């Protein structure tokens, strides 16, 4: 069973204990806990390499926290999803509804985006000042990748699509074909807000077909009960999408949620999700973008809590006992090569977040021989409750 790692920023060449001390010093709320070096050193000049790296990491953490202080994380992602298209970049995703949601929820942003160079300034702030190189391409590629999976699943005969922690997901309105039924699962109050938003922004129900909204508190209603009560047929294959959600749940909640999906999914079902790298979370690999983001999200009350060993062996070891077969695992570099052929991978300034991979699985009738299912989670209801609490925060994910 996969266990959660801990966020331990690690400086180049430092032992883990020293890195942990540096991480502790840099953790906490960015506005009050993070101590910024003397202003004379604002450019990093006059510092040693390790000191300069830590300085820029702290500044990035503070900027990341400050930029999103008054907006939930999913609002920030809603701004980032159409950004490559707004900038005229090649191969951008086709989510044309996201900017409509963005402009309705954040009318001031609509005004700002009309100003010359506003989008470029925003991208510069996120990727250069904060240090989250590849953030915009990551959101862009993740959107396109999951879009393609949804389209392919329908083309191959899957007629049920379950969007977990739906948030501002727009696929049910853009990608539905034929008799496919989409189910958007989220907390009751979040589902109602989504219904109101959709009715206000895209009122034409014939042009933009509605999903079945499953407003469920998983602490009191297991996933199977919540879905089957709305017409979901567990005897038929389904596609389960988990976009930008799993890393925000405690590991026991992730285990419980995946087990519930496994019990509910018929053979031939599919599951796709983005997976945070375990080696970044536990400090084996250092990345300024990850360190800044993790510390800032923690300061905002949205810590990243779980991760995966994102190797074929690691993913298979976790999922095969639950009768899931790995069909696609894309590293950040592989995703760049697939989605952004015009870009070159660079370790120092990667064009894609280097700590997120992309996983697609298919449900089989039997676990591979010799692969016993992991022990039952101590309390599935408790796990579901933890998942609900994680989602019912300042932001409803996916991001």
Image: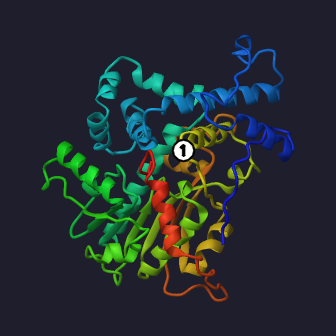
Q: Quadrant of the N terminus?
A: bottom right
Q: Is residue 391 above or below residue 106?
A: below
Given residues 17 and 109, the one toward you in this image is 17
Q: Position of residue 213 (x, y in %)?
A: 27, 62
Q: In the picture provided, is 204 more to the left or to the right than 186? A: left
- Would you say residue 142 is visible in this rendering? yes
Given residues 196 and 100, the one toward you in this image is 196
Rendered residue at 73%/53% (across/down): 282
Q: Position of residue 359 (x, y in %)?
A: 54, 62
Q: How many callouts does the rendering have?
A: 1
Q: Is residue 260 above or below residue 272?
A: below
Q: Is residue 333 above or below residue 3?
A: above
Most extreme residue toward the top, as rendered?
40
Q: Position of residue 132 (x, y in %)?
A: 59, 35
What's the colour scheme? rainbow
Within the image, what quadrant is residue 101 found in? top left
Q: Position of residue 38 (x, y in %)?
A: 73, 15
Given residues 331 and 114, the one toward you in this image is 114
Rendered residue at 50%/60% (across/down): 273
Within the image, what quadrant is residue 185 found in? bottom left
Around disc 1, counting alpha carbons within 10 Å, would you say few (fewer than 14), some (14 to 19), or many (20 or more)?
few
Rendered residue at 64%/34% (across/down): 349
Q: Secondary structure at mark 1?
A: loop
Given residues 82 and 346, the one toward you in this image is 82
Q: In the picture provided, is 389 more to the left or to the right than 321? A: left
The residue wearing badge 1 is 301
Rendered residue at 62%/58% (across/down): 307
- Would you say residue 340 is visible in this rendering? no
Q: In the picture provided, is 89 more to the left or to the right than 379? A: left
């Amino acid at each position: 069973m996969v266990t959660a790692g801990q966020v331990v920023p690690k400086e180049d060449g430092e032992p883990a204990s020293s890195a942990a001390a540096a991480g502790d010093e840099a953790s906490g709320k960015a506005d009050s806990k993070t101590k910024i070096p003397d202003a004379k050193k604002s450019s990093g000049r006059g510092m040693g390499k390790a000191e300069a790296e830590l300085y820029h990491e702290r500044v990035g953490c503070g900027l990341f926290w400050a930029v999103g202080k008054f907006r939930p994380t999913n609002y920030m992602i809603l701004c980032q999803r159409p950004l490559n298209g707004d900038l005229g970049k090649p191969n951008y995703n086709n989510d044309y509804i996201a900017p409509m949601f963005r402009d309705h929820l954040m009318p001031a942003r609509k005004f700002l985006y009309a100003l010359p160079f506003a989008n470029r300034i925003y991208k510069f702030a996120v990727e250069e000042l904060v240090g989250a190189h590849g953030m915009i391409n990551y959101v862009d590629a993740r959107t396109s990748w999951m879009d393609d999976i949804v389209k392919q699943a329908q083309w191959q005969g899957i007629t049920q699509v379950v969007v977990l922690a739906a948030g501002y997901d727009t696929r049910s309105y853009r990608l539905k074909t034929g008799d496919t039924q989409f189910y958007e699962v989220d907390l009751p109050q979040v589902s109602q807000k989504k219904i109101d938003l959709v009715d206000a922004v895209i009122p034409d129900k014939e042009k933009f077909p509605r999903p079945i909204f499953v407003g469920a508190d998983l602490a009191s209603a297991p996933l199977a009960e919540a879905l089957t009560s709305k017409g979901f047929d567990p005897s038929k294959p389904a596609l389960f999408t988990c976009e930008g959600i799993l890393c925000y749940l405690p590991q026991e909640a992730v285990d419980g949620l995946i087990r519930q999906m496994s019990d509910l999914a018929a053979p031939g079902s599919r599951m796709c999700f983005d997976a945070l790298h375990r080696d970044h979370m536990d400090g084996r690999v250092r990345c300024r973008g990850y360190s800044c983001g993790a510390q800032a999200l923690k300061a905002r009350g949205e810590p990243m809590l779980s991760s995966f060993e994102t190797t074929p062996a690691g993913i298979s070891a976790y999922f095969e006992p639950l009768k899931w077969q790995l069909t696609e695992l894309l590293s950040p570099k592989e995703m760049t090569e697939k989605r952004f052929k015009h870009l070159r991978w660079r370790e120092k300034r990667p064009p894609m977040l280097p700590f997120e991979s992309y996983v697609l699985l298919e449900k089989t009738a039997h676990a591979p021989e010799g692969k016993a299912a992991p022990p039952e989670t101590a309390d599935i209801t408790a796990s579901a409750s933890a998942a609900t609490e994680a989602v019912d925060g300042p932001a409803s994910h996916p991001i």
